[in-house]
Image (spheres, helix red, strand yellow):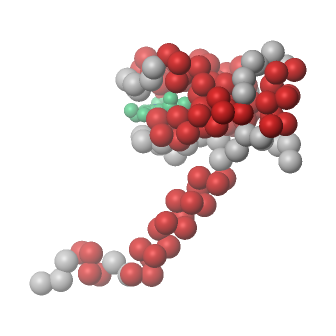
Amino acid sequence: MRSYFDRCPKSLLLLLPAFFIGCASALYSPSQQDVTWANRNGISTSLSRLREGRILYVQTCAGCHNLPRPEKYAPQKWPKLVREMVREQDVQLESRDSTLMVEFLRVASERSGTP
Ligand code: HEC
C-alpha cells in the first residue's frame, strides 16, 4: 500500500531547504554600522550581542507563528511585545536572553530600511 509520503512530489521536498534558507535570509542581519548607530542612539551594544539576539529571536519566537518582521513594530514597542509573549504565552526566556533579543529587535526595527 502506498503511503502519503510516496504520493508527495519529490520535487517539492527538494525545494524545502531552499525555502527555509530564503526565510532566514529575509530577516535583518546586523552590521558594524548598526552598532555604531545604536551606541550613538542610547542603545549600548556590540555586533556579537546583536547577532546573538537575532539567533535567540529566530530560535525562540518562530515556534507558534511566523516570525514577525522587526520593522512591523516601532523600536520602543518591542520590549513590551516580548514581555507579553513571556507572560501570556509562557515563552521560556532567561532575562539576559530577553535583553539581547530586545536589543536586536529595536535596532533591526529602526535600521532595516537602511542599506
Ligand atoms: C507558545 C507560542 C508562542 C511563542 C513561542 C511566541 N508567541 Fe508570539 N504569539 C502567540 C500567540 C497565540 C499570538 C496571538 C495572540 C496575541 O496577540 O496575544 C502571538 C502574537 C504575537 C505578536 C503580535 C502579532 C504579530 O504577529 O505581529 C507578536 C509581535 C509576537 N507574538 C511576538 C513574539 C515574540 C517576540 C516571541 C518570542 C519571544 C513570540 N512571539 C513567541 C504565541 C506565541
Instruction: Report the residue at 48% width, 40% height from top.
Output: 59
Residue displayed at 85% across by 28% down: 37
Q: Quadrant of residue 40?
A: top right
The image quadrant of residue 45 is top right
Residue 81 seen in render: no
For the point 82% across and 43% down, which residue is it?
A: 113
In this image, 39 relative to 90: left or right? right
The image shows residue 64 at horizontal and vertical percentages of: 42, 40
Q: Is residue 86 above or below residue 57?
A: above
**Quarter holding residue 46:** top right
3 in relation to 23, above or below: below
Q: Residue at x 85, y 42 (%)?
A: 114
33 or 85, nearer to the observer? 33
In the picture, measured across the screen, residue 84 lies left or right of residue 74, that is: left
Which quadrant does the N terminus fall into? bottom left
Residue 34: x and y in percent read 80, 34
